Image: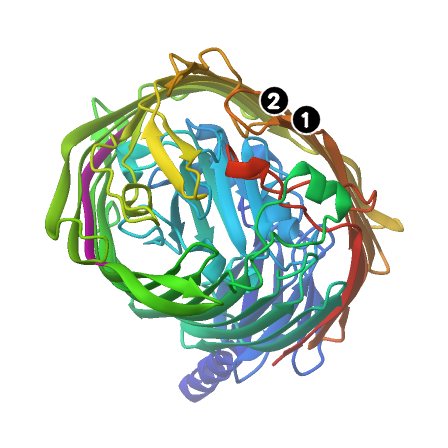
């Protein structure tokens, strides 16, 4: 009898050892999902029951493909044993969204700030050659592209102090500071393949993120790998556009790595506006233990793009495709090669305490022949960010504490030459540049009641730069000049009150500051403006969110008061110079509404949804004296008062889809005197396609699209206050594109 019992136990043990048991849950609600289709690599198919459970008999690990209407398809490799798998919805109500902002991961309804989320689906609505269109569908966010890969970013503000480049906005990439120590951000080094999702914190966020009155953008690329995947895609379009991508993802243990290479080229809509970029990214995630996760990434980017320059009104009317006279002859362009690497660790000491630390190194070789000069720079930067998090209780109420620090430094050899037909001529001046910034931050989130969340944040900020002039052909003084900004304390106070399960209101008071960048202090004609002060601002904001089922609403009103506003003017040689000019009052309203008209798991039309985003910006100068002119009371230069974006999305059972986007932008003042405006314009972009899973291993998508369907004449990024009336940087006319994506899952 004992032998029989022993054999029975052995038999049961063998059965259990050869069993893969899976429960599938909704990623946000953590509720079981029934009717999820499981396809195993050996050809078996099972459907989850009411408890979201399935089981497979197997002695070895297998790759499973999980599909369910309304959810993202998931591939996962599972060994024998019991597993819990999470599926992400395609369309998500605000009440179900969980994001990380201000160094805390909470449901969006509990976040006490205005935050825009840019999902992968937003990027896939357009041609996937740049981030511009996807970000510009969000209220309060505007990215301009004066030429291919020449970005300017504005969050609730103007691009007035950014005639070129990205300034006054702090950007992180996979939790690593991507904004350089001098305050500029080389956003154009990234391809869209390096970004999966993004979150935009609108308004001053210095209590946790340091300098930058405009806001914060957190960019994220894939970090979780299941099984193996080889993918490729190709896109071609008007103006010589072509883009090729090759990607590889491989699971290694409980982690894995992902690699991608992207090549994108275009002749450009205008003369002398070609772009050529190659980007390689390698990232890895490793889990040495249950308490520790290590993340690493390497980015190598080689970018070259031509600068056509601004046109005046007569030139625009004559031929919007022409370049500014002299641009081609002087080879006005950017040639930039960058290597960026980072290493990060997340370590959980206990269930309630953890630390996350990330370090990075970067080097850049930069050349910029321009009509007036020829600039060469070789730079090296380094930095890191660390935070400690504690979850505990205070007076029997949950409290979350975050303490951390961020430091960055950079060294640059910068030389300016004359430009003789696109070749560097004799040297004009040469400098060694050093920039550094450091800040400590602390934040407490305390649940005073089940409905009321109180947040208090504070940071202490230090920044400085040093200019060591070693050569000055004009005979000017040589030697070191240093500017150290007074340490500044940046507070933030916020409240969030839950109005039931599906809605909430919040209010916040936050401060910000933004010191000038070295490019604003050290100009192309060699002068040094060491008296330029940091901008300082305070923001008052209230908001309301509601998200239930297929209907989402997000409303925000704010008042931002900015002092020591940095503005531009242009001298007779066409060199852009900077000055502090009084203050600005910036009042704004933002509204985002999304409605799912049809959400079906069985009909031909599986998804039909509409969304709209309204931005009202009522900005004006206060006490603005500029030379002999008084522009107080004028509208803030470069800001449209009204932007309205409407989106329509359709997805069918057979895989056909359509994405239609309409954007209206009201007139934009192009000079401080408000005597020149860009006319209002309407942009219509359309993408049609077919996407389908073929068996358990192949994914195929084919698409075609058109940008600027109405063939509007407009500038996606004007020059403000230019010399000679060269306000206009014409954007492409109506243009078509098409492409194909193919992936093999193993």
Q: What numbered label is drawn on residue 666?
A: 1
Q: Tell which circle, 1 or 2, labels the residue nearer the N-terminal end.
A: 2
Q: Position of residue 63 (x, y in %)?
A: 58, 76
Judge from the rendering whether residue 170 lies leftward or rightward of residue 51; answer left or right: left
Query: Could you tell me which secondary element the residue under label 1 belongs to?
Result: loop
Per the rendered image, the range of residues in magenta is 430-445
User: Does residue 331 show up magenta in the picture?
Assistant: no
Q: Quadrant of residue 127?
A: bottom right
Please state which of residues 37 and 20 is positioned toward the viewer in this rendering.
37
The residue that disc 2 covers is 641
Q: Position of residue 232 (x, y in %)?
A: 64, 76
Please state which of residues 547 and 416 is positioned toward the viewer in this rendering.
416
From mark 1 to mark 2, how far is it between C-alphas? 6 Å
Quarter of the image with the N terminus is: bottom left
* Dot 1 crowding, Cα within 10 Å, few <14, some 14–19, many 20+: some
Judge from the rendering whether residue 374 lies leftward or rightward of residue 654; answer left or right: left
Q: Residue at x 81, y 54 (%)?
A: 657
Q: Position of residue 555 (x, y in %)?
A: 57, 22
* Dot 2 crowding, Cα within 10 Å, few <14, some 14–19, many 20+: some
């Amino acid at each position: 009898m004992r032998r029989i019992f022993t054999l029975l136990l052995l038999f049961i043990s063998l059965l259990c050892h050869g069993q893969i048991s899976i429960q599938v849950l909704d990623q946000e609600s953590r509720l079981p999902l029934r009717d999820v289709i499981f396809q195993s690599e050996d050809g078996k198919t099972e459907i989850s029951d009411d408890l979201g459970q399935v089981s497979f008999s197997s002695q070895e690990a297998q790759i499973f493909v999980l599909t369910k209407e309304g959810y993202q398809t998931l591939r996962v490799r599972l060994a024998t044993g019991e597993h819990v798998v999470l599926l992400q919805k395609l369309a998500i109500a605000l009440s179900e969204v969980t994001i990380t902002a201000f160094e805390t991961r909470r449901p969006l309804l509990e976040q006490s700030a205005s935050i825009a989320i840019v999902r992968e689906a937003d990027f896939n609505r357009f041609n996937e050659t740049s981030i511009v269109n996807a970000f510009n569908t969000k209220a309060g966010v505007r990215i301009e592209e004066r030429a291919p890969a020449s970005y300017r970013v504005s969050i609730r503000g103007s691009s007035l102090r950014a005639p070129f480049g990205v300034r006054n906005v702090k950007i992180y990439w996979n939790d690593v500071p991507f904004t350089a120590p001098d305050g500029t951000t080389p956003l154009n080094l990234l391809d869209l393949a390096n970004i999966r999702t993004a979150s935009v914190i609108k308004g001053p966020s210095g209590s946790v993120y340091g300098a930058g009155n405009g806001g914060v953008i957190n960019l994220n690329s894939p970090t979780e790998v299941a099984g193996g995947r080889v993918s490729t895609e190709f896109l071609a379009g008007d103006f010589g556009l072509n883009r090729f991508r090759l990607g590889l993802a491989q699971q290694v243990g409980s982690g894995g790595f992902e690699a991608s290479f992207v090549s994108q080229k275009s002749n450009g809509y205008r003369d002398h506006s070609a772009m050529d970029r190659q980007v390689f990214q390698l990232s890895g995630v490793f889990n040495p233990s249950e308490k520790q996760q290590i993340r690493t990434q390497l980015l190598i980017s080689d970018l070259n793009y031509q600068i056509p320059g601004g046109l005046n009104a007569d030139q625009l009317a004559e031929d919007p495709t022409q370049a500014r006279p002299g641009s081609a002859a002087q080879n006005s362009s950017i040639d930039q090669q960058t290597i960026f690497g980072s290493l990060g660790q997340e370590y959980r000491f206990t269930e309630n305490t953890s630390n996350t630390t990330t370090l990075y190194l970067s080097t850049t070789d930069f050349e910029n022949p321009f009509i007036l000069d020829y600039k060469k720079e070789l730079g090296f930067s380094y930095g890191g960010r660390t935070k400690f998090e504690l979850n505990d209780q205070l007076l029997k109420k949950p409290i979350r504490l975050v303490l951390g620090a961020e430091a960055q430094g950079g060294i640059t050899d910068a030389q300016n030459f004359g430009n003789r037909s696109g070749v560097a001529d004799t040297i004009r001046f040469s400098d060694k540049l050093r920039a550094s910034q450091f800040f400590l931050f602390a934040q407490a989130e305390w649940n005073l009641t089940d409905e009321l969340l109180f947040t208090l944040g504070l940071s202490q900020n230090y920044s400085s730069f040093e200019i060591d002039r070693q050569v000055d052909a004009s005979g000017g003084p040589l030697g070191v000049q240093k500017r150290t900004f007074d340490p500044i304390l940046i507070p933030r106070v916020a409240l969030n009150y839950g109005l039931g399960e599906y809605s909430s209101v919040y209010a916040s008071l936050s401060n910000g500051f933004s010191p000038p960048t070295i490019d604003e202090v050290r100009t192309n004609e060699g002068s040094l403006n060491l008296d330029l002060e940091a901008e300082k601002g305070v923001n008052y904001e209230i908001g309301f969110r509601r998200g239930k089922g297929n209907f989402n609403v997000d409303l925000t009103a704010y008042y931002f008061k900015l002092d020591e506003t940095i503005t531009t003017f242009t001298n007779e040689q066409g060199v852009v110079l900077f000055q502090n000019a009084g203050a600005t009052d910036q009042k704004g309203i933002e509204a985002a509404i999304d409605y799912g008209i049809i959400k079906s798991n069985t009909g031909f039309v599986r998804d039909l949804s509409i969304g709209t985003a309204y931005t009202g910006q009522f900005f004006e100068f206060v006490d603005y004296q500029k030379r002999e002119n008084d522009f107080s009371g004028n509208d803030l230069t470069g800001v449209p008062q009204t932007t309205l974006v409407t989106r329509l999305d359709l997805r069918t059972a057979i895989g056909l889809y359509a994405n239609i986007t309409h954007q209206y932008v009201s007139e934009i003042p192009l000079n401080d005197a408000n005597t020149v405006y860009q006319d209002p314009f309407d942009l219509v972009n359309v993408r049609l396609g077919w996407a389908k899973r073929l068996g358990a291993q192949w994914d195929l998508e084919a698409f075609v699209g058109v940008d600027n369907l109405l063939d509007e004449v407009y500038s996606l990024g004007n020059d403000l206050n230019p010399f000679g009336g060269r306000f206009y940087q014409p954007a492409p006319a109506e243009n078509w594109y098409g492409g194909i994506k193919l992936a093999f899952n193993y």
